[in-house]
Image (spheres, rainbow, N blue to C red):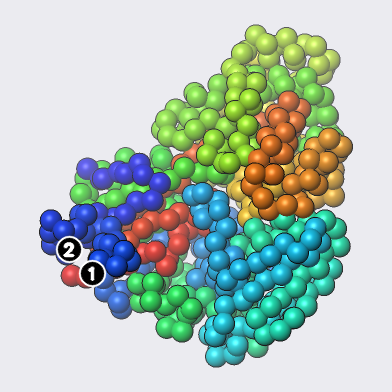
Amino acid sequence: MYKRTLTVLLVLAAVAAACGGDDDDDGGGAPAEGEDGSEQAADFDPDGVLRYGVSLTGQGVSGQLAPFASTSVCDVLVMAPIYDTLTHANPVTGELEPGLAESWEIVDDQTVELTLRQGVTFHDGSPFDAEAVMAGLERNAAQDAAQTAASLAVIESVEAVDDTSVRINLSTPAAGSIPAILSGREGMIVAPSAMETADTEPVGAGPFRLAEHQPGQQLTYEKNEDYWNADEVHLGGIEVVESEAGPPTTNALLAGEIDMAQVSPDVLGGLEGDPNIEIAEQPAKSYYKLNWNLTQPPFDNLQFRQAINHAIDREAVLQAVFEGMGNVAWGPFPEDFYGYNPDVEGVFDYDPDEARRLLEESGVEDPSFTAFVPPTPLFIRFGEVIQAQLAEVGINVEYVQSTDIVQDYFTDRGQPATVILWPPRPDPVDTLRVQFTPGNFNNVGDYSNEELTGVVDQILVTDDAGEREPLFQEGSQIVVDEALDLPVAYAPLLHAARSNVGGEVVQNENCQGVDFTKLQINAE
């Protein structure tokens, strides 16, 4: 049977067999601690190439290779190896760490200064300096940038103070948010020479360079020996290959056609029978939810929204859809988030009688609506369970399948609701800001709540977790009390890997893959 580990960071134990671990190591797969206290990787093949399977033709990866052209958060999977980011956000703790910027300073509410690493170069040999970063940030913030422009809209100007210092001037007090935002696509810097061609011929300063791209089929990467942290990169290359989600990916893993892939709970049973498959499980910050237009009937009615929330048995959803894995979502943030508010737990516990009472008091004459749902087995099953539970209290839901929720729901507003998986943003304040404050794309009805907007504005000016914590708690309470959406489940992040893969499996959220710099191909 496959091996399953519940630790947050799975150190693949199969290295032990490959390396012949002894009494002085911790099993072979974990980095061994040297006499000087430093961590040394177990034996690995420096030329090893990891084959990672993912759908390159479905709804996830868009095929865009420039951060400013990217139309899906899933593109991080294929772009992060090329570009790296100015700051790094730890996928587990959320804490910010240095990236291509070795440090940063909040000068005041509207000014941030970055200090860049010295001696860094792009893949074409040109310097990764303040002028290049200035140009890159300006391009990512341009109005025609598909998805990075919104997060960087507060930038008024960018200055190259000297070769390694960049000053970012903002139009509004939001300096506390900028360092975290720069850990996402917004902080991926394209080389000046590739600004016009990056979408097909990308040039960055990341740990891998793109050697070949066959759209919809495969991306081939080679290690960048000049990367600032090259000694800690143990893969010789990566091949990201087309692999349809579900049974096709399971079969490819079992056949050894791919070394690693993200998997969902419903396919774990298909991996039984192969003792060389490891499963890495990591708590997720993305939550499955029903999203609705808060200014369109019947969702402009608070009691109707509250009735829906009371009608859902979240534990039953976990069992029926996610094989009992994951956690109930009571609000917009998971329990391990530093700003989590425990008071939101059970505000809308499963209470069909209370749901019926609220529905009657709402005055909604026709308690029915149509919602979009992505046409994948997991989303469809999720929608079916929600549909059945709502029917029990007298609310009728019909679904329309959509292969492009962004266009159909968020842009065209074709239906008043949709099933989605909400991924966390680089700065967690954007889970509140872009969904529930005016003037944001994801707030399809331009809903406005002055109290919540005021809380968000306070969060934006500081990056101090101690100052932010009570504000996140206050904002979460407003979102839950006002039933601004239907949060249901935090499903776990799952990756399956064959025994030739070693190192740490550090999983990025949603469909954004893994940190390839933490992995290796074991030496034979």
Quarter occupied by residue 157: bottom right
* Residue displayed at 55% across by 53% down: 95
Q: Residue furthest front?
A: 36
Q: Residue furthest bottom?
A: 125
The amino acid pointed to by label 1 is Asp
Residue 218 lies left or right of residue 62; in this view the side is left
Report which residue position mark 2 lands on.
18
Where residue 173 appears, as percent x and y from the top left, is: 82, 56
Residue 381 lies left or right of residue 106; in this view the side is left
Where residue 180 appears, as percent x and y from the top left, is: 64, 58
* Residue displayed at 70% across by 47% down: 429
Where residue 101 appears, as percent x and y from the top left, is: 60, 71
Q: Closer to the camera, 208 or 367? A: 208
Report which residue position mark 1 lands on.
43
Residue contact at pointers 1 and 2, CB within 8 angstroms: yes
Q: Secondary structure at mark 2?
A: helix
Q: Is residue 7 visible?
A: yes
Quarter occupied by residue 139: bottom right
* Residue displayed at 45% across by 75% down: 229
Q: Residues within 10 Å of mark 1 (few under 14, many from 20)?
A: many
Query: In the rendered image, which quarter contains the N terminus?
Result: top left
